[in-house]
Amino acid sequence: MQTQTAVAIGLVVYAGLMLAVSLYWMFRLRKPADYLVGGRSLPFWVLTGNITAGCIGTGVIIGGSGLAYQHGWAGSAWPIGLGVGTAVAGLMFAVMRRYRFMTIVEEVASYYEGNRAVIEFTNLTLFASQFGWLTAQIIGGARVFASATGMSNQTCVILTGLIIASIAIPGGFKSVVYTDFVQAFILVSGFVCVTWLALHHDGGISGLRHNVPESYFSAFGVSSYPSYGAWAVGGMFLTLIFSVIADPGRRMSMFGAQTERGARWSMVFAGLIVIGFSVLIGITGMYAYQLNPHLPSSDADKALLSVVIQVLPAWLAAFVVIAAASGIFSCANGNAMAISTFFVRHIYPLVTGGKYPNRPLMAARILLACAFILCTSVALHAGTIVGFVMKFLPVTMSGLAIVILMGRFWRRATWQGAMAALILTPVINLIAMSYFPKAFWNNAVILAIPGFVAHFIVSLLTPKPTRSFEEVATALTHERQNIEDKSVGLSSEKPFSPKITTENYEAP
C-alpha cells in the first residue's frame, strides 16, 4: 500500500470518528452554556487531554520540529515554553473557576472595575486574534496533508478547513474537549513511534548526536544560532509563557472544569506532558536533519513530513500524519470555540446595543461557519508558519499578559494603567518589527517592558479602584444569566444594560 493511499484512508476514518463524537454531543446540548463553555461540568481527565492537545498545535508540530531541524534542541524550547506557561497559568489563575466566568474578558473586566474601554479593547483584540490563530492552524494542517498526499496546497487548505469545521460547529466546546482527549492520545502515540524509530535507526542518542552538527546538542541549541543564540531562544521561551497566560482558549478550559481543583491540576499535568513532549519534538527534528540535511531554510517546516514519507511504512506513516494533524486540529477547535463564545457573549451585544441573540446556538454556529470561510480564504495566501506565529504573538498577547498579571497581583492597578499598557505594547512591537527587525533588543519580552512601566506609572497617577473584583464579577454573573438560563431552542431573550451594576447581588 502506498503512503498516500494509507493517509487518505486514515484521514477518512479519523474525520468520520471526530464528526460522530461532535454529533453525539450536539444532540445532548441542553443550554447555550453547554455549547459555549462545556456546561462547566468537564472532568479532570478530559480537560488534561484537551489542554495537552490544545498546546501541541501548528507552532509545536510544524514550527518546533522545523526549528529542531535547523538548530537542534532549540526546537524543544517551543513546547517547553508552552508547557511551563500552562502549568504556571493553572497555578495562578485556576481560582477564577469559582466566579463562573465565560470568557477571559470577564476576568479582565473584574480586575479593572468593569471599565468599558478595557472590556471592549480586550474583547475586540482577542476576537480578532483568534481569527489569526485559526488561520495559522489551517495553514499547518494543509502543509501536513500536502506533504503527505501530494495534493495541491489549495485543496489541502480547503480540506483542512472543512474537517476542523465539522468537529467544532455541531457540538461546540463539549464536543471539542472530548475529541481533543482522543486526539491527544493519537498525537503522543504517533510521535513516540517516530522517536522510537529515530533512536533505533543509528545507535540511539549517541548515534543521532554523531550525525548532526555538534552545536545542535548545546543547551537548547543556542550555539547553532549565528548570533545572539541564548537571547533568541530565551525570548521565544518567555514569549510563549506570556501567550499562555493571555490565551482565551486555555481560560475556557479552566472555566469549563467541574471544580476549581480540576481546573488547576489539569493545567499542571497537561503542562508537564507538553514539557515531556518537547523531547520528542527535538529528536524528530534532528532525525529529519540526519536523513536529509540539505533542505533549504524556507522548507524547514517540511522537515517532520520528510521523515514520515521517506522512512516509515505506509500504515505507520498514515498514523503519524493523522497524529500531527490531530494536534493542529485540536488547537484550531479551541480557537474556533473562542470565536463563537466571544461573539455570543461580547460582540453581538456590542453591535446590537446590549441585546443577546434570540437563539444563541444558531448565532454561534452561523458565525463559526463564516469564520471558517474567512480563515480558509486567508490561509490560501499566507506565508510561513514560524514567521506568522512569532510576529503575531507579541502584537496580540504581550500587552494583555501584562494587564492580566498586574490586575491579578497588584490591587493598586487601575483601568487607566491597563489602557496605557494595552495601547503602548502592540504599538512598540509593530514599530520594532517594521523598522528594527534585526536589532539585539527586538525581543517580545523586552518590548513589553515599556507597557509594564506605563501601566505602573499611570496607575499610581490615577485614583485608586473603588469597586472590588468580587463586586464586578457578581454583576457579570447576573448579566450572563440572559444566555445561560435559556433552554436550547427557545427564542425569548432579556436585553441587558451595557452599564454594569451590582445592586442587590451577593458575591459568590
Image: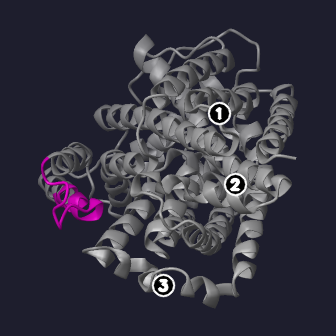
User: Where does the magenta region start and end?
Assistant: 435-453
Q: In this view, does 256 lie to the left or right of 229?
A: right
Q: How far apart are marks 1 and 2 (CA)?
A: 14 Å
What is the three-letter code of the residue carrying label 2? Ile
Residue 309 circle label: 2
Mark 1 or mark 2: name the one nearer the start of the chain. Answer: 1
* Disc 3 from disc 2: Cα separation: 25 Å
- Identify the mark nearer the N-term, 3 or 2: 3
In the image, residue 219 lies at what x, y percent? 44, 85
245 relative to 140 in the view: left or right:
left
Classed neighbour count for the residue bearing mark 1: other residues with Cα under 10 Å, few (<14), some (14–19), many (≥20): few
* Distance Cα–Cα, label 1 vs label 3: 36 Å
Q: Residue at x 37, y 55 (%)?
A: 401
Q: Mark 3 points at which residue?
A: 217
Secondary structure under tag 3 reads helix
Q: Which amino acid does label 3 sit on?
A: Phe
Q: Give the farthest residue toward the bottom.
A: 206
Residue 49 in view (yes/no): yes
Viewer-side label of 3, 2: 2
- At a point 62% along the width and 27% down the height, the residue shown is 155
**Residue 43 can be seen in this image:** no
Closer to the camera in the image, 300 or 365: 300
**Labels 3 & 2 near each other (Cβ < 8 A):** no
